[in-house]
Amino acid sequence: MFSPGQTYSALLWFFPVGVALSVILHFAAKRWPKSPLKYAIAPVILGGSSSIPPASPMNYLA
């Protein structure tokens, strides 16, 4: 199902994207400690995108 050429093969790209985003957010929060980046969590950002149709941006900001 996840092998190359199959329906869900593109989902495997989210593993390196998730790691890279986590590292970027970590160092950005260390670089700018007073910014809201310290509250950003990569798995919530990436996993929350599956709920976008019924959710509004306010669900993620509140």
Image (cartoon, rainbow, N blue to C red):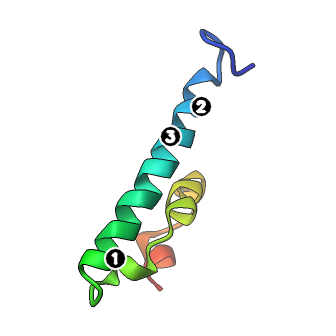
Q: Secondary structure at mark 3?
A: helix
- Pointer 2 local density, CA inside 10 Å: few below 14, some 14–19, many at least 20: few
Between disc 3 and disc 2, the foreground one is: 3
- Pointer 1 local density, CA inside 10 Å: few below 14, some 14–19, many at least 20: some
Q: Amino acid at mark 2?
A: Leu
Q: Quadrant of residue 2?
A: top right
Q: Secondary structure at mark 2?
A: helix
Q: Which mark is residue 29?
A: 1
Q: Is residue 8 left or right of residue 56?
A: right
Q: Which mark is residue 12?
A: 2
Mark closest to the chain's N terminus, 3 or 1 = 3
Q: Is residue 35 left or right of residue 38?
A: left
In depth, the one of 36 and 32 nearer the eye is: 32
Q: Secondary structure at mark 1?
A: helix
Separation of disc 3 and disc 1 at Cα? 20 Å
Q: Quadrant of residue 26?
A: bottom left
- Residue positioned 59% across, 56% down in the render: 47
- Residue positioned 47% across, 69% down in the render: 56
Residue situated furthest left in the rendering: 32
In depth, the one of 52 and 41 nearer the eye is: 41
Q: Which residue lies under the disc numbered 3? A: 16
Q: Which mark is residue 48?
A: none
Mark closest to the chain's N terminus, 2 or 1 = 2
Q: Position of residue 14 (x, y in %)?
A: 53, 40
- Residue positioned 65% across, 18% down in the render: 7
Q: How many marks?
A: 3
Between disc 2 and disc 1, the foreground one is: 1
